[in-house]
Image (cartoon, coloured by chain):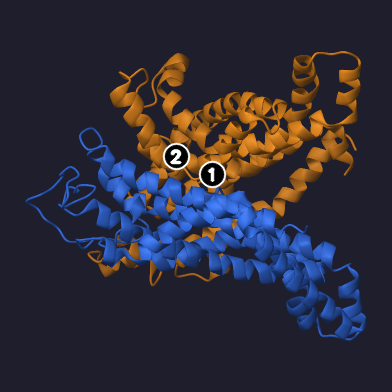
Amino acid sequence: MTLGVYVLRRLLQLVPIALGVTVLVFFLIHLVPGDPARTILGNQATPQRIALLRHSWGLDRPLYVQYGKFMDRVVHGNVGDSLFYGVSAGHLVLQRLPVTLWLIGFGTLLSILLAVPLAAIAARNRDRVPDHLVRVVPLVGLGFPPFWLGIILLLVFGLHLGRPFPVGGYGSGFVGHLHSMFLPALTVAFAITPILIRSLRASLLEVLESEYVTTARSKGLSERRVLMRHALRNAVVSTVTVLGVNIGYLVGGTLVIEQVYSLPGIGQLMINSINQRDFPVVQAVTLVFAVMVVIVYLLSDVVHALLDPRVRFD
Amino acid sequence: MAVAAEAVVEAQIVEHRRGFARRWYRTPSFVAGASILGLIVLAALAAPLITNHGPTSQDLLNTLQGPSSKHWLGTDDLGRDVWSRLVYGARTDLKVAFLAVLFPFSIGTVIGLLSGYYGGWVDTITNWLVNIVVAFPFYVLIIALVFALGPGTSSIYIAITIVGWVSYARIIRGEVLIAKRRDYVLAAKSGGLSDARILFRHLLPNVVTQAIVFACSDIVLDILAIITLGYLGLGVQPPTPDWGRMIADGQTFLTTHWELSTIPGIAVVITALGLSLLADGLADLLRPE
């Protein structure tokens, strides 16, 4: 199967999932106990305003008509208008999306920079002290609430180490973003690194025990060269897969981390919209987060297929 | 033949239990995890006996005090005893987390059993639903669902169930796909036993182990979700003490009283460590010898 056909097949498989995602996002509003319009507008709202909102959202129409209208808007890039800002929710999301993408990208990069050397050290020293020490990281690290980790980093870097990095904001320009986003990205990285270390160590150990590595060793290659040129290169495939599988956790973590560091991304937009009971924006952000995860799943599959052509023939 | 198959299953389960009883104290991670968690659960249960103040009692003349013999961990901005809130918070968060894991465990296990055993359209629909839920980032869907349902513990249970069942369904389905080709299931089928009896009497005891091990790790994720919801004001509602709310309240005083946010966070990390060790130990113990 060529790569093009493989990608097309994966895209087609994503269609029913994307439809399901829109159904779930659409039904969010119907989970609101009682009358959603009354709940969202609050007790002070006049009956006319409630009726107006019900009508404008189509809540007085049959469910399938509501879903049809919702899908029509989604296809045209607009889930609805923000109740708080009075502009299109899609517009608000697009405005703030770059911050979140930066945070995810930078966080992923830092997590790779942290996890790969640690996993390599552990695998090279299997069942010895360095291995045991590295294995403690996932055991303890997975129990850290990401937002609390952010607070601790704020405390350490913001108060006790003389503020080498800004403790909030997005910064301006490429270098400014790198500088300002370092602590939030490190927090994102700390949340995902324990999972990466665990999987990478396991796959490195598997590779180090494989026949071709034994051959490389018997040819007289140094252990360092075996690890760098043979084992790590192959372990990249599993890193991509593990990152792809856990991207949901990583992306979800940014939601609260943006709040801790006051980053103007879509995570903070969602939390603020929750506090303002701005339903269309919450729906829009939820949908965008899901779309992001689906795209990353697809990309990780494609990268996996590029790195390991056997995948295309499964 | 069916009777013989049932006898084999019974013997396997009894053997499993004997193996567990023989080896648990020789599994360091299990002992460490059970000890840590045991102490926390004990403290939570004995909360009225080991605290001198109510978790919600305010003393506005003694706000933001440091540790003293009267208030072991000091007081917060409303003069509430931090130690009391920490211990009662353990009570709240552990109870909610244990209950929250029960629903997805039960529902996911049943769906996984049916999906793996029957295959066909049941399996197709299950996989479709699993893929939809997995497409959402964990925290995003939980937060969106609790927002829609309204803050509070009932919403937490519903949201965690909607998001969490998929993992159990996937684990059990995978195990059933292998187990249903084994001799004891084929013997039970040819012996004319009903599907319900095969599923719940024969398959379930043999495939549920992995789901139990996963549940221990899943509670860690659930506790983190409950704390995060509490931090955002969507979780356990005041005045009930909750570690997430304690961290959020303390954040305002981070520059002057850093311990208010740090102490409940450390409590979360230690609890999660206990559960992770317990899960690792259980995985070792329940693995066939």
In the rendered picture of this protein, how many numbered marks are placed on residues? 2
Nearest the camera: B98 or B282?
B282
Question: Are circles 2 and 1 on residues that touch, CB within 8 Å?
Answer: yes
Mark 1 neighbour class, 10 Å CA radius: few under 14, some 14 to 19, many 20 or more: some
Q: Is residue A28 above or below residue A162?
A: below
Q: Residues within 10 Å of mark 2 (few under 14, many from 20)?
A: many
Quarter of the image for residue B216 reads: bottom right
- Residue named by callout 2: A266
Q: Does residue B138 lie above or below B205 as drawn? A: above
* The colour assigned to chain B within the rendered structure: blue
Amino acid tagged 2 = Ile
Q: Look at 91% across and 78% down and name the residue there.
A: B187
B197 in relation to A98, above or below: below
Task: Pick whichever, A220 or A168, lies toward us.
Answer: A220
B211 with respect to A60 (left or right): right
Q: Quadrant of residue A57?
A: bottom left
Image spot of residue B247 (x, y percent): 32, 46
Q: Chain A drawn in what color?
A: orange
Residue on which the image places disc 1 = A288
Q: Are marks 2 and 1 on the same chain?
A: yes
Tell me if I can see residue A186 in this picture.
Answer: yes
Along the line of sight, the residue nearer the viewer: A34 or B57? B57
